[in-house]
């Protein structure tokens, strides 16, 4: 059975073909698919022309599939079943709460921002499948480019094209020290001592690491990094032990500063601020779930920004 290369089989033809093969009657087939008998007959003639062979043997009013018809029937039933499955899946996708959400986020966002956002989001979309990819801003941009995530919760990149940035909040980086550190005890930071400290910093290859380096370079200061780490929790524990000091955003150490186990102090008269937001491709229209995620994140971000 050789199909004409320039022709394609229509869904309505395949459905009429399958029903006719099953019922063996043009009349019954027409009734089942809500067409006239003439329309079914014309559809089968067109199908046979496209197939380039006879698909039915006709004996009076009874029709039975030929060998070619039996072969096509196997494929047609499979095609229609797959289309029905796809239609069902798309219908579920369009329902409120029936979808997936692929989020990329920095380690800081994963630990401090996403939990309250996802708690609220799950109340509205309990059946939405959520996956989270951790990483810093450059990695998130690459994941967006490759279509592996839908949204990225990260710092604002210097060049946003072709990304859209939905602002969440702005934070301020500060020195974080143990309460026994001389700076905390004396409530002052002598400028000449800044370069002499042992710093425990988030990985310098990150976007935040670059911001910190640039800030102090403008101040004419080179920080003496004792330890680089990829996790905020570990950094905080080491600072508590007074192994060194760090530069973090106060909202990431809110529990510790409230408990008095860490102290946040300004970097100086010139502030180091960062903008957090949600990134996505400009040309991509967000789904209902994605829009709600952004709105909830903005609401949580307001509370963080007010810290």
Image (tube, rainbow, N blue to C red):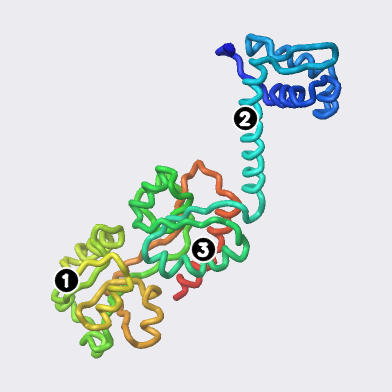
Q: Is residue 96 left or right of residue 57?
A: left
Residue 269 visible in rendering:
no
Residue 13 badge? none
- List x then y, in percent, for residue 35: 83, 24
Quarter of the figure that contains the N terminus? top right
Quarter of the figure that contains the C terminus? bottom left
- List x then y, in percent, for residue 27: 86, 21
- The residue closer to the viewer here, 280 or 78, is 78
Q: Residue at x 66, y 54 (%)?
A: 96
Q: Which of the two marks, 1 or 2, is nearer to us in this view?
A: 2
- List x then y, in percent, for residue 294: 53, 58
193 to 82, vertically: above or below: below
Q: Indicate which disc, 1 or 2, sits on the residue closer to the N terminus.
A: 2
- In the rendered image, which quarter is residue 175 located in? bottom left
**Label 3's element?**
helix
- In the rendered image, which quarter is residue 52 located in? top right
Q: Indicate which disc, 3 or 1, sits on the residue closer to the N terminus.
A: 1
- List x then y, in percent, for residue 2: 57, 11
Q: Residue at x 63, y 40 (%)?
A: 85
Q: Which of the two marks, 3 or 2, is nearer to us in this view?
A: 2
Q: Is residue 84 left or right of residue 159?
A: right
**Residue at mark 2:** 79
Residue 226 badge? 1
Q: CA distance from mark 3 to mark 2?
A: 42 Å
249 to 81, vertically: above or below: below
Q: Residue at x 27, y 82 (%)?
A: 240
- The residue closer to the viewer here, 115 or 248, is 115
- The residue closer to the viewer here, 35 or 219, is 35
**Residue at mark 3:** 297
Residue 160 visible in rendering:
yes
254 to 8, vertically: above or below: below
Q: CA distance from mark 1 to mark 2?
A: 63 Å
């Amino acid at each position: 059975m050789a199909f004409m290369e320039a022709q394609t089989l229509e869904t309505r033809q395949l459905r009429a073909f399958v029903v006719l093969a099953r019922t063996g009657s043009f009349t019954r087939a027409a009734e089942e698919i809500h067409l006239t008998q003439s329309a079914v007959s014309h559809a089968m003639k067109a199908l046979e022309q496209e197939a380039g062979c006879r698909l039915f043997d006709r004996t009076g009013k009874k029709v039975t599939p030929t060998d070619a018809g039996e072969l096509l029937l196997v494929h047609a039933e499979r095609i229609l079943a797959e289309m029905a499955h796809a239609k069902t899946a798309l219908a579920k996708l369009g329902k409120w709460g029936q979808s997936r959400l692929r989020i990329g986020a920095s380690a800081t966002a994963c630990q401090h921002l996403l939990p309250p956002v996802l708690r609220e989001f799950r109340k509205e979309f309990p059946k939405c499948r959520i996956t989270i990819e951790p990483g810093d801003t450059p990695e998130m941009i690459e994941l967006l480019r490759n279509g592996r995530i839908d949204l990225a919760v990260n710092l604002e990149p210097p060049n946003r094209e072709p990304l859209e940035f939905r602002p969440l909040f702005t934070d301020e980086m500060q020195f974080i020290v143990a309460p026994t550190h001389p700076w905390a005890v004396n409530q002052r930071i002598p400028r000449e001592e800044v370069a002499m400290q042992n710093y425990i910093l988030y990985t310098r290859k990150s976007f935040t690491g670059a911001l910190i380096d640039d800030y102090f370079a403008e101040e004419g200061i080179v920080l003496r990094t004792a330890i680089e780490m990829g996790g905020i929790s570990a950094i905080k524990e080491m600072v508590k032990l007074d192994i060194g000091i760090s530069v973090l955003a106060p909202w990431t150490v809110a529990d510790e500063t409230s408990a008095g186990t860490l102290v946040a102090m300004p970097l100086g008269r010139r502030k180091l601020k960062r903008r957090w937001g949600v990134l996505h491709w400009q040309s991509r229209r967000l789904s209902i779930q994605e829009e709600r995620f952004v709105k909830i994140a903005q609401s949580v971000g307001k509370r963080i920004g007010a810290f």
